[in-house]
Amino acid sequence: VQLVESGGGLVQPGGSLRLSCAASGLTFSSYDMSWYRQAAGKERELVAAITSAGGSTNYADSVKGRFTISRDNAANTLYLQMNSLKPEDTAVYYCNARRRSLGVPYNYWGQGTQVTVSS
C-alpha cells in the first residue's frame, strides 16, 4: 500500500493550497480517508475526514469554513483544499486510510507533505 501526498509548499497568510494524496495497492473506495497534521513540537491532530463513498465529512473546528476535503474514487485520490491559510496551519500534513474488515483494522499513512504559511 502506498499513500503519496503532494501539493505542499510555502504560501503567504491568506493564500491557498490544494493537497493531493494518491493511493495505490488498496481498494481505495473501501477506505475512510483523513488528513492529519503535525506541527513542530506538537501531537498529530485530525484535520478532516471523509467516508468511503464521500457522503459524510467532518472537520476540526480550527479549519471549518476554510478547508474542504474531497475524494475521487475513480482516480484513487484524496484532496484537501486549503483556503485563507494562517501561520498556525504550518505543519506536516499526512494522508490516512483506514477500514475495518471482519474485526481486523487496516490503517495506512503517507509520508507527509510540508505546508508552511509565512510572509
Image: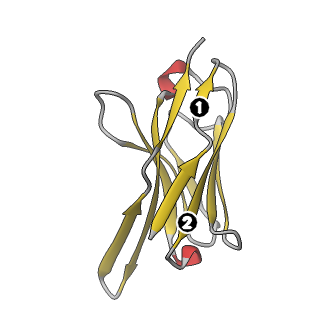
Q: Residues within 10 Å of mark 1 (few under 14, many from 20)?
A: some
Residue sitting at x 30%, y 83%: 103
* Residue 87: numbered disc: none
Residue sitting at x 36%, y 67%: 107
Image height of 116 relative to 101, above or below = above
Q: Residues within 10 Å of mark 2 (few under 14, many from 20)?
A: many
Measured in 3D between alpha carbons, the distance from the residue under mark 2 to the one under mark 1, in whole angstroms, is 20 Å
65 left or right of 37 in image:
right
Q: Amino acid at mark 2?
A: Ala
Location of residue 118 in the rendering, given as x and y in whole percent from the top left corner = 56, 16
Q: How is the image coloured?
A: secondary structure
Location of residue 43 in the rendering, given as x and y in whole percent from the top left corner = 30, 37
Location of residue 45 in the rendering, given as x and y in whole percent from the top left corner = 38, 42
Image height of 104 relative to 70, above or below = below
Locate the N terminus and report the quarter of the image it occupies. Answer: bottom left
> Which of 12/59 is in front?
12
Q: Earlier in the sequence, mark 2 or mark 1?
A: 1
Locate the C terminus and report the quarter of the image it occupies. Answer: top right
The reply to whether callout 2 and callout 1 are in contact (CB within 8 Å) is no
* Residue 23: numbered disc: 2
70 left or right of 27 in image:
right
Q: Amino acid at mark 1?
A: Gly
Residue sitting at x 50%, y 67%: 32
Residue sitting at x 63%, y 18%: 13
49 left or right of 82 in image:
left
- Which element is circle 1 on? strand
> Which of 12/102 is in front?
12
Q: Which residue is mark 1?
A: 9
Location of residue 96 in the rendering, given as x and y in whole percent from the top left corner = 45, 58
- Which element is circle 2 on? strand
> Which of 23/45 is in front?
23
Image height of 27 relative to 80, above or below = below
